[in-house]
Image (cartoon, grey):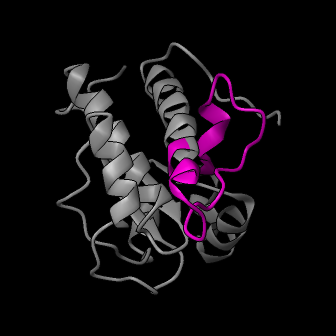
């Protein structure tokens, strides 16, 4: 990996379930790899439904049980400055990808991708929204995100390229 700081923004709808989970998981992987000085992570939502709120308590509980801390995060909506501030902007599902593509200035569209394109075991490119379901949905989301976060870190280290298949 080059010496310059890399930055990744994870995006879902309200920034209280999927994207903060991705941010928390990825930050821990980066820190555990000794790369916190070289890779920055953040998260945002495509909509302003939950701006200023902490991540969903169910997402926090499942994450905490696996050693991830989401407690200090606050939801925010993606802003125009994010398209220049981040190297990668990763959507949790196709709707987010479509919204991001519409919002992004043309020179920044190449930065937008799908989180699960970095997964090694996922059968789809979409991280399902667990908001209206039970704890099993949050556990499934965490499984998918852990897989993709590992692949993303490997990609940033030059060890793996994202997949386009689903």
Query: In this orientation, which residue lies closer to the viewer: 59 or 89?
Result: 59
Q: Is residue 83 left or right of residue 73?
A: right
Q: Residue at x 26, y 70 (%)?
A: 74
Q: Is residue 87 above or below residue 133?
A: above
Mark yes or no: residue 98 visible. Answer: yes
Q: Is 103 above or below relative to 19?
A: below
Residue extending farthest bottom: 49
| In the displayed structure image, the side of residue 33 where residue 78 appears, left or right | right
Image point (71%, 50%), residue name: 126
Q: Using the rendered view, name the quadrant where residue 134 is placed.
A: bottom right
Can the viewer see residue 8 in this picture?
A: no
Query: Quarter holding the C terminus?
Result: top right
Residue for point 45% across, 26% down: 156
**Residue 79 appears at what percent x and percent y?**
42, 77
Q: Position of residue 65 (x, y in %)?
A: 30, 39
**Between residues 84 and 19, which one lies in front from this camera angle?**
19
- Percent coordinates x, y for residue 63 in the rendering: 34, 44
Q: How many marks?
A: 0
Q: Which residues are magenta?
A: 112-139
**Closest to the observer, 118 or 60:** 60
Q: From the top left corner, tell me how far across and down residue 152 is, in percent.
A: 50, 30
Residue 3 within the magenta-colored segment of the rendering: no
Whether residue 121 appears in magenta in the rendering, the answer is yes
| Left or right: 30, with 13 as reference point | left
Identify the image quadrant of the N terminus. top left
């Amino acid at each position: 990996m080059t010496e310059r700081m890399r930055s990744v923004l994870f995006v879902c709808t309200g920034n209280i379930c999927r994207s903060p989970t991705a941010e928390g998981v990825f930050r821990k992987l980066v820190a555990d790899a000794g790369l916190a000085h070289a890779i920055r992570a953040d998260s945002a939502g495509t909509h302003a439904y939950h701006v200023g709120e902490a991540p969903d308590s169910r997402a926090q509980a499942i994450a905490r049980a696996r050693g991830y801390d989401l407690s200090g995060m606050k939801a925010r909506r993606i802003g125009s400055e994010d398209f220049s501030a981040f190297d990668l902007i990763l959507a949790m599902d196709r709707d987010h990808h479509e919204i991001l593509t519409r919002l992004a200035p043309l020179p920044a569209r190449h930065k937008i991708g799908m989180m699960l394109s970095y997964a090694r075991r996922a059968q789809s490119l979409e991280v399902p929204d667990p908001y209206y379901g039970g704890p099993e949905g949050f556990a499934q989301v965490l499984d998918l995100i852990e897989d993709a976060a590992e692949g993303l870190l490997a990609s940033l280290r030059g060890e793996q390229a994202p997949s386009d298949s689903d």
